[in-house]
Every structure is written in C-alpha cells, then in structure tokens.
Image (spheres, rainbow, N blue to C red):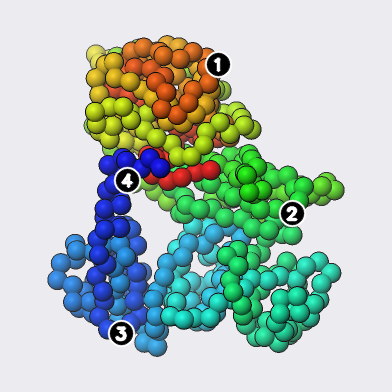
Amino acid sequence: MHKLLSAALFFIIIFSTVRPVSAQEGGPYYVVQPGDTLSSIASRFNISVTELMTANNIADPNLLSAGQQLVIPGLEGVTGVLNTEFINFGDSYYNLLRRTQISPELFRKLNHIVSPTEFYVGASMIIPQQDNAPEYAALSPKPGESMLEMAVRNNTDVWTVSSLNGLSAPWAGLPGDSLYAPGNASGQLSSGLPSAFESASIPYLPLKQGGTGEIIVKTQPGVTLGGILVDRPLHFFLMEDGRQVALQGVHALLEPGLYPLRLDATLPDGTTQSYEQLVIIISGNYPDDPLLYVDPVTIDPAATEPESQQLITLTTPANPEKLWTGDFISPAIQYADSTYFTSRYGNRRTYIGQGTDLSIDGFHTGLDFGGGTGLPITAPAAGRVVFAQFWTVRGNATIIDHGWGVSSGFWHQSEFKVQVGDYVQQGQIIGLVGGTGRITGPHLHWELWVNGIQIDPLDWLIQSYP
C-alpha cells in the first residue's frame, strides 16, 4: 500500500493517533466525526454550543478530535452511543427502522426527519446503539414463498417477524420486502431493491464535487447492468468476486444538491427492472486562486476548444479491460519531495492573457506537483499510452488509459519517455517535468478522468478503488 502523501499522513495522524477524550458519565454519547465542529454538533441536536461545552467540561472549543465521545444534553430517556450512518443505495426509511429497531418517534427526534421522503443517499443519520444489543439477520420472502415458509427457512416464526418489522399481520410480508429477524447479521443488509438485485452499495459517502462515485452491485445470475448518475450513463464491469462495479466522476462545478442515481437491470429473458433514488452531492469547498497571467495564445478559444474536444474524445471511452491492480501511487514518487503540491484540484481560477483583454474562468482540473525541469514522471498505475504529443494549452502531454473508464493525463512535460501504444507498468518513467504550454513555471500537472469527468487525483492516493 502506497499511502505516503502528506495529506494522507495528516488524516492518519489526526484521526488515528489522537486519543479520544472520554465524555462524562451518563449519556447519550455522540461520536465526533471528521469535519465536525462544536457548532455543527450543537446545531444537529438543536442545543447551544454553551450547553454542549458545559455538559462535557470543554474549556477550549478548538480541542475537538474525531472519535471523541460527547454527552448530548436534552435527550432524556436516550442512552448508549449515537452513531452516524450514511444512507446507502436501496436503503429506505422503514428498512432502517426495522434493521435498527429504533422507534419512529426517537428517529425523527434525533434526525429532524419530517417525512420518509427526506431519505436521500448520502444523508447522514444518527442511530443510537446499545452495548450488547441483539443482532438481527436480514431476510426476504422469495417469489411464490409464504411468510410461514420464509420463517421456517430462517429458523424463526411469523409472529416474531411480524412484531419486529411492524407488519399489520403475520402474512403481510411481500416478495422482495426488507425484513429482519433475531439471529446473526450476515453482513449483507436487506434492501428494497427489485428481485434482479441482491445488493447495491456506494463505499465512499457522501459524494462530493470532484469525487468518484463507486457503485458496487450484486445481481442474480445473467443480469446485465446499466444506469445513470446525475446525467452520465454508468458502465458496469465484472469484479473477481462476481459483483459488478461502475466508477463515475462528479464534476467539480456541479451545483451541490440532489441528483438521480438509477440502476437498470436486464434479465436473461429480456425483461428489465429499474430502481432510482436521489443522491446528495455536497460541496468540495474549493477556494479561489489568485488571478493567473499567462500567454494569451493559451487561452484563445481557437486553441482551447479543439484541444478540449480532443481530450474528451480520448478520455470518454470505457475500456472493458482493467489494466491496473492495487492502489494508485504518486506520479512524483521519485522526487526528493513528492508531496509538495503547488496547486490542488478544484481551485476556482481565472486566467488573464498578458497584455490583452482575453480571460477564461474555470477550475483547476488536476493536481500540481512542484519541481524543476527534468525530474522524472512515473505512471501512477499500469495502463496503455493513447496520446503523446504537443498541445498548445497542455504542452507536451501524455495520456494513459488504465481501463474501466479511468485515464491519467500528464501535462507540461519537457520530454516524452513513451509513445502511443506502449503498455506501462506502475512506477515506470513516462516523461520529464517541464514548462511547456499554459504555465507560470515548470511543474507536473496530473489529471485523472473517471468516465469522462475530471476528478480529484488525491482521492485515488488516499482511498482504494477496485
């Protein structure tokens, strides 16, 4: 595992080595999440910051760490730990209540839910968890199977199932219904998905501007998958364990809000089933860069538009062959300091042509590594070179297709070390740092495309994708 970037180390140090501060005796306790502040926690539970600090003997509101337990005042009758859980694809309001055995009244009180229609993929919910709480196994009636038959198959009885799941009668369960019964949890949660789907999940939630949506689906045998995320068609590929996965980038300029995620299943007999939920896209919180003064030729639409269209053409195809294995590594891994970033992905930018009125607004589409001309650039993962030539804006540019709709671009090079058609291994030198194209000084710009959208490359250095 190559997780040596300073940003990654920062998260590890902050979130792993800081010893959580214990809360006072009593409860309930809320477990602080990365990014939480006292203000955001107080707002979530409809209390004041002063009340929260007093209940936990906090003198300095800045000394808050992920994993710390805080007593939440004003929740009389509630005990245990208040865990945060993200709503995933296929989850529903009633499914979550059945699985956690939390009362609707308490759930609405903790999460300010007015209606079950507010249940969106990526929304974080507070779920109370007791020590030594009983486990519940997921079960669901099969087509043509009665509730009694299902209960016998799962070593339980229809009255217990009816009571736990709030059914109007012991026979009221329907095929595909998400139900629970006492027993060891299988690790695979029941869901309200159609019968063609056994399970579906998105590992990294919530989705953000510039992030990567990873949708993993297990289907019945012989099912072909498709779908959309926002307005992009999803391409699914078979994983080694038999599940299928689609990777989809989220545009850095997409307005935060609710967008559709739909899965389409085509069964072996040609019939189709679909399931759609709204997914929350949150802000990437990208800052504004200072104005950048560049050669006006590099922001002239006569040069930028054809180049951009060619880039889209090269990075849109979804090669069904996965060419990489394991985690991505930094393309500046051979630098003396491979974690020196001169500019991050997503920063809002305006370029001004020196001595002209030309300007162009947008965002920084990649990750810039500092370093002088001639330093080696290495492949972050295995793949095949599909482009290696000069562009006006991007200078000497190389594009590597990694498969499954994932491509890397390396701009502004002083020298190429590969050519179109070459298969490159992870860590192989593919070029040298330079100052060609639209630049303010020599550097390596690394760009990562996922199904036709530029995303934050740093995510792929911190997290593992299939």
Q: Earlier in the sequence, mark 2 or mark 4?
A: 4
Q: Position of residue 110 (x, y in %)?
A: 42, 75
Characterize the local packing of mark 4: few (<14), some (14-19) or many (20 or more) Cα atoms within 10 angstroms: some
Q: Nearer the viewer, residue 369 or 330?
A: 330
Residue that badge 3 annotates: 26
Residue 38 sits above or below residue 384 on the image: below
Q: Earlier in the sequence, mark 3 or mark 2?
A: 3
Eye-nearest disc, 4 or 3: 4
Spatial distance from mark 3 to mark 2, Cα to Cα?
47 Å
**Picture quadrant of residue 187:** bottom right
Identified at 30% across, 58% down, the residue is: 16
Spatial distance from mark 3 to mark 1, Cα to Cα?
65 Å
Element on which disc 3 rests: loop
Characterize the local packing of mark 1: few (<14), some (14-19) or many (20 or more) Cα atoms within 10 angstroms: few
Element on which disc 2 rests: loop
Give amino acid for label 1: Gly
Q: Earlier in the sequence, mark 3 or mark 1?
A: 3
Q: Quadrant of the N terminus?
A: top left
Residue that badge 2 annotates: 220
Element on which disc 1 rests: loop
Q: Earlier in the sequence, mark 2 or mark 1?
A: 2
